[in-house]
Amino acid sequence: MANPASPIDTSSSANDLAYLRSLAEAGKDAPLSAGPYLVAGGGWFAVASAVIGSAELALIPFDREEVMPVSIIGACVGFAVTLALLLRRDGRGAETNTNKAVGAAWTAAGVGIFLYFLAVQIASWRMGSPELLNSIMLVVALLYGAAWLVTAQVAGQRWMYGVTVLTAISLFGVAAALATPAAWLAYSGALVLSGILPGAYLMHLARTVRE
């Protein structure tokens, strides 16, 4: 059996499962638990961004000014409630070292996003430049990419480096779309690529290992 402490190259789903099983069987680690958090964070804000983007492009019969506050507040409340439920559920079990490290990376990213959101609100108000608020999209993509890079190095799974690259590509895609009606939909797509899809894959791997 492979040494769980050593990084294991995993280029396919079968190799991913073998890696996670080796950790679980050794009793020293467990499947990564970040999946539900990524799906929750990416999901709530991807939906909100998609609604705002659809209004921007006149795909729905509402103005952006009408849907934006409702969508953003709804996403914040929905994510906060989901996060509280997940933390309450996962707090009952013992954390492994790998999950602690991965959790720390994503917590740092989340705190950074929240602090930047508050700071850019102040800067936008002081400078009279509401366009500054759009920079939050770039910061989210940047911090997601950094968190995925740390996660890939801690977990030693090659597919996560691919997610890091996709997140970087989505960062430049969102940057190119800023100041156009497609900006919010581009941001929603970036959240799907960097949060929802890889998070759902992590959940799939965790379920399979436990079966």
Image (spheres, rainbow, N blue to C red):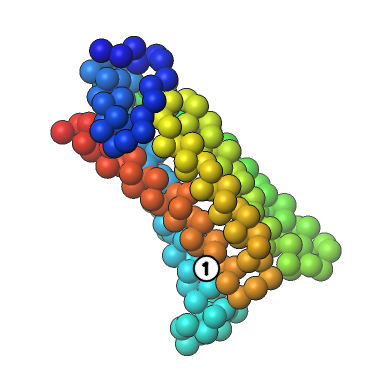
Which residue appears farthest toward the left when viewing the image? 211
Which residue appears farthest toward the bottom when viewing the image? 61
Q: Quadrant of the N terminus?
A: top left
The percent position of residue 129, horizontal first and vertical second, equals 79, 67
The percent position of residue 33, horizontal first and vertical second, equals 36, 35
Q: Nearer the viewer, residue 188 or 124?
A: 188
Residue at the spot x=84%, y=63% of the render? 127
Q: Quadrant of residue 138?
A: bottom right
* Mark 1, residue position: 185
Residue at the spot x=29%, y=37% of the render? 13
Q: Amino acid at mark 1?
A: Leu
4 relative to 92, above or below: above
Circle 1 crowding by C-alpha within 10 Å: few under 14, some 14–19, many from 20: many
Which residue appears farthest toward the right when viewing the image? 127
Q: Nearer the viewer, residue 86 or 113?
A: 113
- Specify whether 197 is left or right of 24: right
Q: Nearer the viewer, residue 6 or 144?
A: 6
Q: Is residue 7 visible?
A: yes
Which residue appears farthest toward the front when viewing the image? 11
